[in-house]
Every structure is written in structure tokens, then in C-alpha cells.
Image (cartoon, rainbow, N blue to C red):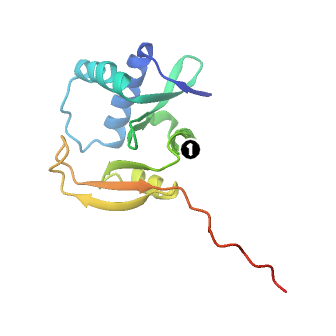
Amino acid sequence: MVIERASRTDAAGITSVHLLSRRHVLPYIPVEHSDEETLRWITDAVLETQEVWVTRRDAKILAFLALSEDILEQLYVDPAHLGQGLGSGLVRLAQARRPQGLQLYTFMRNTRARAFCEHHGFSLVRTGDGSDNEENEPDALYRWAPEKPDPSPQSPAN
């Protein structure tokens, strides 16, 4: 497997992972857009305005990540490959690419994603009632900040 920067030619594979994951992991979220609309959004918005990385085996995209300035906008893994470390690899990449810190949103009911975030050092900042997202689903804002080294020098023990 390899992690590499995505291009417009990856739009269909990214869209496939996005749609499969949403349907498998978030079946309680109403489908707001057709598959074709989602492909256009991935192609014309996500790939054009965000830094997108994919994990692939051979030519098949298994997971993807999209970053904006300090927001981890999208992180999706093909449901057939959950629990294999693909998401963890992408989060480590995001943390390396944004060493000043990152924020992300996830849905409150997505307990797997919330545990994943916390496992990777993200802390809950606040929760929302869903009025600020298209799905009208209660959400949670998480933030990751790198640990700061202790500025005080350690005195040697006598």
C-alpha cells in the first residue's frame, strides 16, 4: 500500500470510498445528494480547494483524506478495509502536514470515529445540535495540538 497525493483522475475512486463508507458507517444519515452530485463535489470542490491524499493498493483507492488550512475536512476508509490502520496512517500524515494543529468535525452518533479521534490525540472542544451542518445531525468538534516540550530545564539529581 502507498499513500500519495490525489489528482483529478482519482475523483471516481475517492467518490466510491466516500459513498461506500457513508452508507456503511453512517446509515442513519439521510442521503442528501445523488452519486453524480457527490462525484461533481469531489471533483470540483474537494480536489480543487483542498489537499487530498489517498491510500491505494495497486490502482484501487482504499482510503482518502482531505485537508484545508487547519481542518481535517474528510477522512473515509473503504468499509472492507476498516481496522487495518489506513485511517491511522492518514491521520499521522495530516498531523505531520499540519504540525501547528488540526480540527475536525464528526457526528455525535459516530462513536467509532469519536473513539478514533481521541485515540489519535484529538480532544473534544464542543458539541453542536446539528443546525450548522447539512445533515442536521448533532456533531462534535475535536482539536489536536502537538505536545509542547517543557521549557524548564531539568536539574540533575544529586
Q: Measuring from the top left, give residue 88's x and y in whole percent.
A: 54, 44
How busy is the neighbourhood of tag 1: few (under 14 within 10 Å), some, or many (20 plus)? few
Residue indicated by mark 1 = 92
Q: Measuring from the top left, give residue 37's x and y in whole percent.
A: 23, 21
Q: Measuring from the top left, give residue 107's x and y in whole percent.
A: 29, 50
Name the side, left or right, on which 51 lies relative to 110: right
Please, is residue 17 above or below residue 136 in the view? above
Residue type at mark 1 is Arg
- In the displayed orientation, state which residue is furthest to the bottom: 158
Q: Which quadrant is home to the N terminus?
A: top right
Please, is residue 71 above or below residue 127 in the view? above
Report how many numbered discs are placed on residues in the image: 1
Residue 111 visible to the viewer? no
Residue at image point 49% right, 24% down: 61
Q: Which quadrant is home to the C terminus?
A: bottom right
Residue 145 visible to the viewer? yes
Q: Nearer the viewer, residue 157 or 124?
A: 157
Question: Which quadrant of the figure has residue 133?
Answer: top left
Mark 1 residue element: helix
Name the side, left or right, on which 108 lies relative to 10: left
Q: Measuring from the top left, give residue 79's x and y in whole percent.
A: 44, 36
Question: Which quadrant of the figure has residue 46?
Answer: top left
Residue at image point 80% right, 79% down: 156
Name the side, left or right, on which 46 lies relative to 96: left
Residue at image point 37% right, 48% down: 104
Residue at image point 38% right, 43% down: 71
- In the displayed orientation, state which residue is furthest to the right: 158
Q: Nearer the viewer, residue 20 or 152?
A: 152
